[in-house]
Image (cartoon, grey):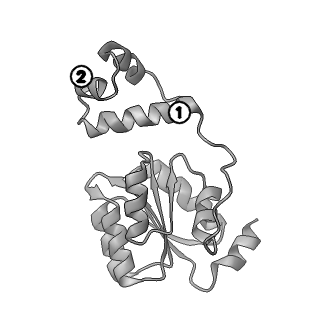
Amino acid sequence: MADDVTADLGPDRTLLLVDDDEPFVKRLARAMERRGFITETAESVAAGKAIAQSRPPAYAVVDLRLEDGNGLDVVEALRERRPDCRIVVLTGYGAIATAVAAVKIGATDYLSKPADANDVTNALLAKGEALPGPPENPMSADRVRWEHIQRVYEMCDRNVSETARRLSMHRRTLQRILAKRSPK
């Protein structure tokens, strides 16, 4: 697998990973290095933009929601400095509107977390306009529901009553759901 990927990478194998989840970004960096990429990591919009300005990579994986802002700002900075950069936007809060926005400003693909190194590699190296194949391990219906509830909860600034109202759900039911761990 690694030899096939290395052949597809081309001469410039630089990869920028921007994510504020430190254990995740370190794990992904190690996995991508095993696939032949030369990785550099950043944990904020500011650090990602600084790297984009000084050393624009050939590939990038950018988390949409970072503590200091929106990952789409990093995507724009990468596009300005290196128009041929292949960029995958990665997020745990997937929504059609953000996927469209990411692609409009220059992202190559958009993946929802949890995405593994194989998913990321396939998205970075995809050729042409062909639709990608279905995922090997799609999220369960329970997980999709949980992700949607979490996204609305975050959009309501973690206000349980407002979230329950918007989801047409009883507040106590929502509290029980929020108290549980995420389904697989």
Residue designated by label 1: 143
Please name whichever residue, 174 or 71, is drawn nearer the observer in this view of the structure: 174
Place of residue 118 in the rendered image (x, y in percent of width and height, measured from the top left) = 65, 58
Query: Residue at the spot x=54%, y=61% of the render?
Result: 29
Give the secondary structure at mark 1.
Answer: helix
- Quarter holding the C terminus is top right
Q: Amino acid at mark 2?
A: Ser
In this view, 99 is above or below 93: below
The answer for how far apart the CA atoms under marks 2 and 1 are is 22 Å
Query: Is residue 32 toward the left or the right of residue 71 in the image?
Result: right
Query: Residue at the spot x=50%, y=49% of the render?
Result: 112
Give the secondary structure at mark 2.
Answer: helix
Query: Residue at the spot x=42%, y=83% of the render?
Result: 82
Mark linked to residue 14: none
Query: Can I make out residue 184 in this image?
Result: no
Task: Tell me which label, 2 or 1, sits earlier in the chain.
Answer: 1
Q: Amino acid at mark 1?
A: Arg
Residue designated by label 2: 161
Place of residue 165 in the rendered image (x, y in percent of width and height, measured from the top left) = 27, 24
Please name whichever residue, 143 or 49, is drawn nearer the observer in this view of the structure: 143
Place of residue 26 in the rendered image (x, y in percent of width and height, measured from the top left) = 50, 56
Q: Quadrant of residue 93?
A: top left
Total marks shown come to 2
Query: Can I make out residue 104 in this image?
Result: yes
Query: Residue at the spot x=30%, y=17% of the render?
Result: 171
Answer few, some or many: residues within 10 Å of disc 1's Cα (few below 14, many 20 plus, some between 14 and 19).
Answer: some
Query: Is residue 122 toward the left or the right of residue 175 in the image?
Result: right
